Amino acid sequence: MHTQGSEATAAQIEPTRLAVLIDADNANPAIVEGLLAEVAKLGVASVKRIYGDWTTPSLGKWKASLLEHSIQPIQQFAYTSGKNATDSAMIIDAMDLLYSADLGGFCIVSSDSDFTRLAARLRESGKVVYGFGEKKTPKPFVAACDRFIYTEIFTQHPENAETVIQRRSAQELRQDTKLCNLLRQAIEAASDDEGWANLGPVGSQLAKQMPEFDPRNYGYSKFSGLVEGIGLFTLRRENNLLLVKDQRPGKKG
């Protein structure tokens, strides 16, 4: 017999229901497997749709992935040369889903800045927005998302050195002043009186300030490895928690 408390607990751990909306004109079919694996870490892909003009040969490479991953293709004819009707169709569908579906968030897969206002509008309605696009994606769209994941990390193949994101050295990481400064600010915000901070909240704080942050962009599989690799911070484990502290003189403790 289930108690009210157990039902409440089950409701609390229910994964977030997400809508995955893919702009076929501005995404690479090679990312699909990695993309959906990443989405699975964030929640459940309750809706998976991809938009484009499927009468054109340029989208042919997508078709094999659609059946394999149960992605629904949405046909959108290019009515006028030079105008992208796909963007409009995605935006209209997203707004329909916002009001008609019980969703916790949206995954917008595109490198197109036309979705900047859509991302902002969805967040205004209390939905979490994850953006997925290439590193060429305009900064306004990146900043409009709660988190933005560069899709180059999904096309790495160890057998092809050109596709692998090389791990940055300590010197290269230290020269990234934006990363180091934001990391220090995140540690400061989450630290106790002695200057130690739980690494988990530090990562969350950093992502709020830098939506595109991902240790994999620097060649590290884990956040802890990146922090250690910079060489400016001290890490220690305490009661199954990983703690971090700024090494600079004059800091707390």
Image (spheres, grey):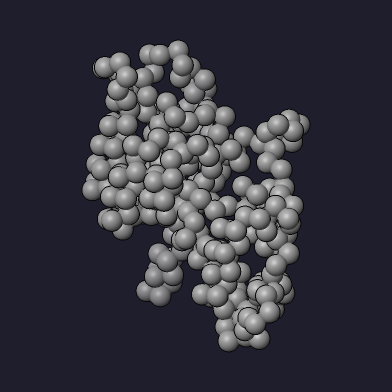
What is the quadrant of residue 233 in the picture? Answer: bottom right
Return the x and y of residue 215 as percentages of the image width and height: 62, 53
Is residue 240 visible to the viewer in this orientation of the structure?
Answer: no
x 45%, y 19%: residue: 59
Q: Is residue 45 left or right of residue 253?
A: left
| Quadrant that contains the N terminus | bottom left
| Residue 213 point in image, percent of width and height | 54, 53
In the picture shown, does residue 10 fall above or below 38?
Answer: below
- Residue 172 showing in the rendered view: yes
> Where residue 169 sits in the image (x, y, percent)?
74, 52
Which part of the image, by quadrant, shows the C terminus?
Answer: bottom right
| Residue 45 vertical placement versus 104 (above, below) | above
Find residue 55 and report its horizontal and vertical position in percent: 38, 13
Please name the residue shown 44% across and 29% down the image. Answer: 26
In this view of the protein, which residue sits in the foreground, 85 or 252? 252
Report the residue at 57% width, 64% height from top: 181
Residue 21 or residue 252, whichever sits in front? 252
